[in-house]
Amino acid sequence: QSALTQPRSVSGSPGQSVTISCTGTSSDVGGYNYVSWYQQHPGKAPKLIMYDVSERPSGVPDRFSGSKSGNTASLTISGLQAEDEADYYCCSYAGSSTHVLFGGGTKLTVL
Amino acid sequence: QVQLQESGPGLVKPPETLSLTCAVSGYSISSGYYWGWIRQPPGKGLEWIGTIYHSGSTYYNPSLKSRVTISVDTSKNQFSLKLSSLTAADTAVYYCARHSGSYCFDYWGQGTLVTVSS
């Protein structure tokens, strides 16, 4: 199966909101509420920032929120801060054959 | 606090087999959870390689399944990855991570760069 589809890049100014989309199919994103999001700064390991579509792990600011509609999941970051500049990856459970799919990643630039 | 640490060679010749180990601290593998490997070629995105349960049940990426073996050693609290028939396309940073019941990866190792080159 192909990777989930994310925009290559998004940008926003400090204080603004940005939304990153993650499009799959009914066999992955649309079929299960097991979408997660990861933030990765250069040279660092990915960090879990959202799971089960809209659940935030402890310590993740509530500026980060997640949602899903049909086969597309979204991560919204409100009140953009300079430290939010990073790569963001979505991930979905994809059934008992494929198991796990990642998105191609989105580079967020804070202008 | 759960911590994971990858170890293994940084350079491997094609078509040899890559062997990596992930040592887990702060949590006993035998207590549960799944444990996975993910890789990231330089400048590219993340790719799930496979996952193992503490009992030894394994789940592999279909595109890599023929070349991958993941095993667990609960006595040493670690799990391992073997990837055979290496080519330059396998050059990547390899991460180990805890694979939670929500099918997400909640704790990650720092990653180890593996270069496949003769």
Image (tube, rainbow, N blue to C red):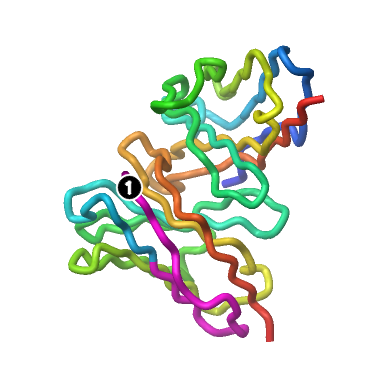
Q: Which residues are magenta?
A: B1-21
- Quarter occupied by the N terminus of chain B: top left
Q: Residue furthest right?
A: A111
Q: Left or right: where does residue B85 sit relative to residue B4? A: right
Q: Chain of mark 1?
A: B
Is B66 placed above or below A6 here? Answer: below
Which residue is nearer to you in this view: A103 or A86?
A: A86
Question: What is the count of numbered marks?
Answer: 1
Residue lying at 62% horizontally and 29% vertically, measured from the top left: A22
- Measured as percent of width and height from the top left, residue B66 is found at 47, 69
Is A56 placed above or below B107 here? Answer: above
Residue lying at 61% horizontally and 18% vertically, measured from the top left: A76
Which residue is nearer to you in this view: A14 or B105?
A: A14
Q: Which quadrant would residue B81 be assigned to in this image? A: bottom left
Which residue is nearer to you in this view: B63 or A49?
A: A49
For label 1, the residue is B2
Residue lying at 32% horizontally and 64% vertically, measured from the top left: B79
- Residue B15 part of the magenta-drawn span: yes
The amino acid type, in three-letter code, at marker 1 is Val
- Quarter occupied by the C terminus of chain B: bottom right
Residue A27: tell me if it is visible.
no
- Residue B2 part of the magenta-drawn span: yes
- Measured as percent of width and height from the top left, residue B98 is found at 36, 48
Q: Which quadrant would residue A41 be assigned to in this image? A: top right
